Image (spheres, grey):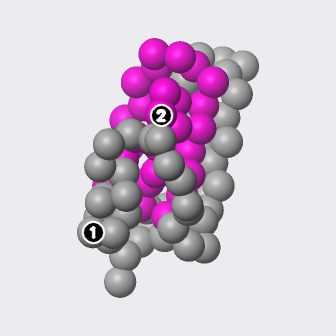
Amino acid sequence: MSAPLFLVWHGAPGAEVEVAEPNHPLAEGMFLVRSERTLSKLYHAIKHQLPEDTALCVAPLADAPKFKGLAEGALKWLRSGA
C-alpha cells in the first residue's frame, strides 16, 4: 500500500524544496508528495526550507486529484503509486 498523498504549494518562485519522500512536480511551486510523515511534520520540513513569510499550503489528499495541463509525467507518477 502506498504512503499517504499530499499536495504542496508554495509562493516562492524559483525556490528549491527537497523532500526525501517520493514526489513529483506539477507546476512552479506545486508538487505531490507520498509521505508517512504527519501533515504537521511534512509542513514544517518544507516551511523551514523557504524564505520567511512565504505562502505555503500542504494538504492531505484522500484520492488522486484530477488535473490537466500540469507537468509531464505527473499522471503516470500517480498511477505508479510511487
Name which residue lies at 59% across and 38% down: 9
Residue at the image point whose x is 61% and y is 62% from the top: 60
**Taking 21 as reference, is 27 left or right?**
right
The range drawn in magenta is 5-34
Nearest to the observer: residue 80 or residue 69:
69
Dot 1 corresponds to which residue? 80
Residue 15: in magenta span: yes
Identity of the residue furthest to the front in this view: 69
Quadrant of the frame with the C terminus:
bottom left
From where the camera sits, is residue 18 visible? yes
Identify which residue, 61 or 47, lies in the foreground: 61
> Which label was assigned to residue 31?
none
Q: Earlier in the sequence, mark 2 or mark 1?
A: 2
Mark 2 residue crowding within 10 angstroms, few (<14) / some (14–19) / many (20+) = few
50 above or below 60?
above
Q: Quadrant of residue 38?
A: bottom right
Residue plotted at (29% across, 49% down): 73
Please give the label number shown on residue 27.
2
The local secondary structure at tag 1 comes to helix
Q: Which quadrant holds residue 17?
A: top left
Q: In the rendering, at what x and y percent does residue 80 appear?
A: 27, 69
Residue type at the position of mark 2:
Ala
Q: Residue at x 30, y 60 (%)?
A: 76
Looking at the rendered structure, the kind of residue marked 1 is Ser
Q: Position of residue 74 (x, y in %)?
A: 36, 51
